[in-house]
Image (cartoon, rainbow, N blue to C red):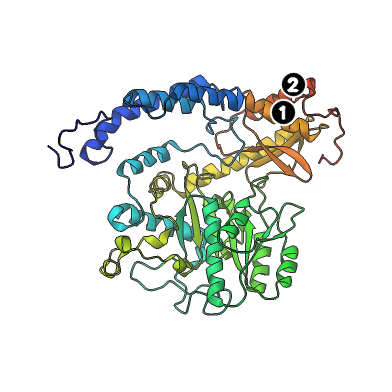
Amino acid sequence: MSAFTVEGAQDPPGPGPFAGGALGSAALRPLLEVVLEALASGAEQRGGPLPAGGPERVADEVRATVGAVLRERGTGAREALETLVGLVARGAADPSEPLCAAHLHCPPLALAVAADVAGSAVNPSMDSWDQAPAASELEALVCGELARLVFPAEGGPPERGGAPGPEGPKRPWGSEGPWGSEGPSGPDALVTSGGTEGNQLGLLLGREAARARGGAPLRVVCGANAHHSVGRAAWLLGLAPPVVVPTPAGVLTAGALDEELARGGGAPALVVATAGTTDAGDVDPLPELAAVVARHGARWHVDAAYGGPLVFSERLRGRLAGLERADSVAFDLHKLGWQPVAAGVLAVRDGAALRPLAHRAAYLNADDDTEAGLPDLLGRSLRTTRRPDVLKVAVTLRALGRSGLAAMVERTCAAAERLADVIAEDGRFSLYARPPLTTVLFRPRGLPDAVVAAARRELLVGGAAVLGRAAVGGRLWLKVTLLDPTVREGEPEALLKLVDEAVAAVVERGAGADGAVAASAEGERP
């Protein structure tokens, strides 16, 4: 009898052995076959980018299929996997479908998904070395490589126990920097859950730097184009709401930022710039902003959650020129990196900037354990328990290399350019602007915003296409966010045909037009 068996109790029915250990692979193999069959069957039954019928129909099917969530007796592994994986696959908005292009929601690479399965099976928790011996070292290597990719001129972080890296540029707020007089340590990075956490960390590091300096509290300054998570991060951190600089042209300009920082009276400021807005993919003029930030002695965080992976491409990274002058940069690999969620990174130009995250919990990083040489992982995140998200990233980097990822980024940007060309040549639609990254905004000519919104819902509820919406320049636009580098011949034209048919259906019903379906297109870009 096992030491963990309760005397007199029967072994519960279950799915068999655990996923790890010597027996884990044998246990997983038949279950993964069931999962793969359910995924294929569900996608075939769905037959498009998302299920038709809208929220009510999907909810009805989910409730009917699930029935009792917690039954007295289980149904067994095969039935549970077939039923629920099949249900979610049938009811998915699948980013691997070409017509599912509303959000920064990428089709994940099969090899990254396979690596994610392996990470789940081994199940390391990244908060102490004794839970993740190899995975924690792998994370340190990957983070160092990605940090040097963002900050190539700063040198590498020191080897564990080694000397600091080469001297970097002058830190803001004093020659010794806000972290003391130990000097810069070279670039470093942390794994995050995405841009929201990355922005929160960027603001947190700025707040702690201001506290170390003493005096006035930190002012966060961002453009009106900044991601909503910047304001939320300020709220969570007990900071004043960000000072929002108007961005009528879609980007934060150097002149407007200069004026705002001058009004600050020398109070410590953290500027948040954006390299890839959610609405249009716009990139702030980073070199000009860097000069303004330096002149005022402010700190600088760049939200590059969308555009950051352009650093893989020598041909395209010029679009992010100036990024390397930031103090911290958030970017995601579950967007233009084709990773399953979550795969975010926060890179810092000086690894010493991460010292405020240091934290002690005796059961995870006791002083004597650290002194004896056990790595301290608790300061590598605001989270305690963390999945080994680095494994799928490391597998992808190794399998594709920099050139392979660069080619995918370049093909995706080129696909957006081709879609913009097709729209520009089609008299039925107005193109907002050439795509700075992979987002294309357009709208039917001569129709009010209400028709644009209703046509999008027509496509969505009908299961025909998943398009986004963006309110830019005083008008509502349909948004295509391309994250698939395999766009095929004829697909852009097919998308426009679907949109045209949806618009026609809305106009015929008079839906959403408020009696003004034939309203003029005054204010539209040609």
* Residue lying at 56% horizontally and 51% vertically, measured from the top left: 305
**Left or right of residue 288, residue 130 in this image:** left
What is the three-letter code of the residue carrying label 2? Answer: Ala
> Does label 1 or label 2 sit earlier along the sequence?
1
Q: Residues within 10 Å of mark 2 (few under 14, many from 20)?
A: some
| Quarter assignment of residue 246 | bottom right
Q: Where is residue 154 in the image (x, y as percent from the top left)?
A: 50, 67
**Horizontal side, residue 352 vs residue 172: left or right:** left
Q: Nearer the viewer, residue 206 or 170?
A: 206
Q: Does 384 appear above or below 494? A: below
Residue at the disc numbered 2: 505
Residue 155 visible in the current orientation: no
Residue 117: x %, y % from top left: 36, 39
Quarter of the view holding residue 13: top left
Q: In this view, does 396 lie above or below 201?
A: above
Specify whether 219 is left or right of 504: left
Q: Residue 366 appears at what percent x and percent y?
A: 30, 66
The label shown at residue 521 is none
Q: How crowded is mark 1: few (under 14 residues within 10 Å), some or many (20 or more)?
A: many
The circle drawn on residue 455 is: 1
Cα distance, mark 1 to mark 2? 8 Å
